[in-house]
Amino acid sequence: MQGKQLEGMKVAILVDTDFEQAEMVEPRKALEQAGAQTVLISPTSGEVTGMQHDVKADRFKVDMPLDQVRANDFDAVMLPGGALNADSLRMNPKAREFVKQMDQDGKPVAFICHAPWLLASAGCVKGRTMTSYYTIQDDLRNAGANWVDQEVVRDRNWISSRSPKDLGAFNPAMVALFSESKGKVRSTR
């Protein structure tokens, strides 16, 4: 990841508490090293807790509450996984509306592990090729997705991966997609 190819981009990172920590921390670091401004967004105010698989890990300050977020304020969105996090977010109407609007605007969306549950609940996955943690493949297929078992999958403005073991491929693919979209999609902020 050379240079600051994401300079000037504002990237939403949407989580609820109990997200998979590595799937937030490592992509966030890759985005910031490439020059992006990242904003940790959550329906939970104050702080959120990361998980290392099934063990509680570190706490992170929420930069912006979900109820104050507008899709027009961001250039891209990154969705970490974690089963509890993803299950909570998919039941949140504001989270569903936010990711649906980002996708409808053609903005890049990067997601990993259980995170595509939110996209499925938002009605975004029909006809899209994607991957995820293997345990939710039936949910995604039933929502109309073409699910594949690959390290990283790109479908138009989406990048997806299966789990933390794929972060080595996910992070550069995400930065490349976001960089490619930089000149194409302009937010109205």
Image (cartoon, rainbow, N blue to C red):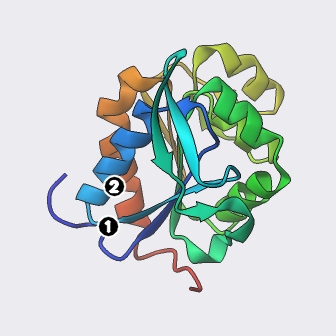
Q: Amino acid at mark 2?
A: Leu
For marks 2 and 1 on the same chain, the one whose residue lies earlier in the sequence = 1
- Does residue 127 appear anywhere in the picture? no
**Residue shown at 47%/40% (left/top)?**
59
**Residue shown at 34%/40% (left/top)?**
26
Residue 113 badge: none
Q: Would residue 79 appear left or right of 143 to someone viewing this image?
A: left
Place residue 155 in its image quadrant.
top right
Relative vertical location of residue 17 with respect to residue 163 in this rendering, above or below: below
Residue 20 location (% of width, % of height):
51, 29
Relative vertical location of residue 52 with respect to residue 152 in this rendering, above or below: above
Q: At numbered mark 2, what does the secondary structure look like: helix, strand or loop? A: helix
Q: At numbered mark 1, what does the secondary structure look like: helix, strand or loop? A: loop
Residue 144 location (% of width, % of height):
79, 33
**Residue shown at 65%/24% (left/top)?**
83
User: Which image quarter is the C terminus in?
Assistant: bottom right
Q: Residues within 10 Å of mark 2 (few under 14, many from 20)?
A: many
What residue would you read off at disc 2? 31
Place residue 69 in its image quadrant.
bottom right
Residue 50 location (% of width, % of height):
50, 33
Q: Residues at badges 2 and 1 in contact (C-beta under 8 Å)?
A: yes
Q: CA distance from mark 2 to mark 1?
A: 7 Å
What residue would you read off at disc 1? 6
Of the two numbered discs 2 and 1 in the rendering, the one whose residue sits closer to the viewer: 2
Q: Nearer the viewer, residue 124 or 87?
A: 87
Q: Residues within 10 Å of mark 1 (few under 14, many from 20)?
A: many
**Residue shown at 14%/57% (left/top)?**
2
Q: Most extreme residue toward the front, as rendered?
A: 46
Q: Amino acid at mark 1?
A: Leu
Place residue 133 in its image quadrant.
top right
Relative vertical location of residue 69 with respect to residue 95 in this rendering, above or below: below
